[in-house]
Image (cartoon, helix red, strand yellow):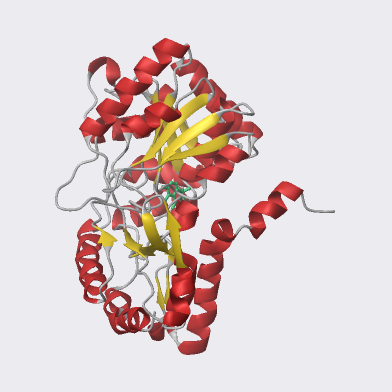
């Protein structure tokens, strides 16, 4: 059999492949019905142009005809870029004194995804566990699974804040790390400083008791995109064994350029060894280094911004549209996703999609997402994110798409 059984199994898994499949279906539907008649909320692909500073930096870097510009480099990236990323983290997180980062605490990676995969390679041995609060970015399962690790989802509280007690119960000597993502994809939740402080306390106590200190990994590609003045807390001052992984995919609208980095807390006990292990992973996983051209670009324009108020306006629009359709959702505090509860069916023929778990009845969201497709509305089912009964609407789409979907959404709900 040419394909590895493990890969085949994952590829056939409904939850794991559905978002990308949906994206492709969206393209086919648009070709059939026209762009304006399809409401595609399936993928978190920013539609806003990168800021002008990015284009300026691209032109400046392109002018440099030094042949070494396109050559190999140290696997961690250019030192000038690493220094710039350290300055970015210090500024955003207001880090002072001993807690301040410098270039040697940074590894440039192939997006946040490449960074997370390198971290997993560096810290996970077969049988180790990676704890994640639900809901979580669906790809975490694979980043961790590649190295024989097991993802351990811990159900969040009803308001989608972290259940620290739940995480405490899930910790064991097999726990390599706890991975949090704030603002969260898909819930839009921002974890409060108090929650992270409590989590840090539990991790410290566990480390002292069992002799293995779990890392705290903060996946923060949406840090800059927050609503109503909300701020994302910094974990570095609260827990030494911590790392931030991020990218310029969302804040500068550069997902295709695959430019990101990992920042290791300089106060971590094994900070230098950890950086060395992540660099080793970057090299041997075949990434070798983060893209050379865009390392030069972001070193110049890391402080630029797209107009995040556009996302805030879209957030207001989509919450109104979805509320008008009578569908419940989690109020986003950041990122650009709306996490909705699939409504329980009212039509007799759809009642077979009412399922049950410990919390009571819920709707099979795969069936509701399929039903919405009949009205050309495409959304991502929540099971892949560890939350059956929910679905995600990515609102990094035009205002026209958002307002245009209201009637279709209402019809989908009425006929369900
Ligand atoms: C929570 C989260 N982490 C990581 C990533 C990967 O980001 P990148 O495109 O920078 O690899 C994404 C992308 O959507 C994401 O939503």
Taking the image as shown, residue 372 lies to the left or right of residue 318, namely right
> Residue 149: where, in percent of width, then height?
59, 33
Side of 311 where 172 appears, left or right: right
Res. 101 visible in picture: no
Report x, y in % for residue 290: 52, 40
Q: Quadrant of residue 238?
A: top left
Residue ID at (20%, 59%): 309
Q: Is residue 183 above or below residue 316?
A: above
Front-most of residues 352 and 57? 352
Residue 138 location in percent, x, y? 49, 50
Q: Position of residue 224 (x, y in %)?
A: 27, 47
**Camera-side residue: 164 or 204?**
164
Q: Quadrant of residue 178?
A: top left
Query: Looking at the image, which residue is at 38% across and 38% down?
Result: 180
Furthest residue in direction right, as rendered: 1
Q: Is residue 369 above or below residue 213?
A: below
Residue in the foreground of this view, choosing between 51 and 13 = 13
Classify residue 222 as left or right of residue 176: left
Q: How many marks?
A: 0
On the rendered structure, is 68 left or right of 182?
right
| Screen quadrant of the C terminus | bottom left
Q: Nearer the viewer, residue 189 or 399?
A: 189
The answer to whether residue 169 of the structure is visible from this angle is yes
Furthest residue in direction bottom, as rendered: 33
Residue at 28%, 80% in the rendered image: 406
> Vertical placement of 204 versus 409: above or below?
above
């Amino acid at each position: 059999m040419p394909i590895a059984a493990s890969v085949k199994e994952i590829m056939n898994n409904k939850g794991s492949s559905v978002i990308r499949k949906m994206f492709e279906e969206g393209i086919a539907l648009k070709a059939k019905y026209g762009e304006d008649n399809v409401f595609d909320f399936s993928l978190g692909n920013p539609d806003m142009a990168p800021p002008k500073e990015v284009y300026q930096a691209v032109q400046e870097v392109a002018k440099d005809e030094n042949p070494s510009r396109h050559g190999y480099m140290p696997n961690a990236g250019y030192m000038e870029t690493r220094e710039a990323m350290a300055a970015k983290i210090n500024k955003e997180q207001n880090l002072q004194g001993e807690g301040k980062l410098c270039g040697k605490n940074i590894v440039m990676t192939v997006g946040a995804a490449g960074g997370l995969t390198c971290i997993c390679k560096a810290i996970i041995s077969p049988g180790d566990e990676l704890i994640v609060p639900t809901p979580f970015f669906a790809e975490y399962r694979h980043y961790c699974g590649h190295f024989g690790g097991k993802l351990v989802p811990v159900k969040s509280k009803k308001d989608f804040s972290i259940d620290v007690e739940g995480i405490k119960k899930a910790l064991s000597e097999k726990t390599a790390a706890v991975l949090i993502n704030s603002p969260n994809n898909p819930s839009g939740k921002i974890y409060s400083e108090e929650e992270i402080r409590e989590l840090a306390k539990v991790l410290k106590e566990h480390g002292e008791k069992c002799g293995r200190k779990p890392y705290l990994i903060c996946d923060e590609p949406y840090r800059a995109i927050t609503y109503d003045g909300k701020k994302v807390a910094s974990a570095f001052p609260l827990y030494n064994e911590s790392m931030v992984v991020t990218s310029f995919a969302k804040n500068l609208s550069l997902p295709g350029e695959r430019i990101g980095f990992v920042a290791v807390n300089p106060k971590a006990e094994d900070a230098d060894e950890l950086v060395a292990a992540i660099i080793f992973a970057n090299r041997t996983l075949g990434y070798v280094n983060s893209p050379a051209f865009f390392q030069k670009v972001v070193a110049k324009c890391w402080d630029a911004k797209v107009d995040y108020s556009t996302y805030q306006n879209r957030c207001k629009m989509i919450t109104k549209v979805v509320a008008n359709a009578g569908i419940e959702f989690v109020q986003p505090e950041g990122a650009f996703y709306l996490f909705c509860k699939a409504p329980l069916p009212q039509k007799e023929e759809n009642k077979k999609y009412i399922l049950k778990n410990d919390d009571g009845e819920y709707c099979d969201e795969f069936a509701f997402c399929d039903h919405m497709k009949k009205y050309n509305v495409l959304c991502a089912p929540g099971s892949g994110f560890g939350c059956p009964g929910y679905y995600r609407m990515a609102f990094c789409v035009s205002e026209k798409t958002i307002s245009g979907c209201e009637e279709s959404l209402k019809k989908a709900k009425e006929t369900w």
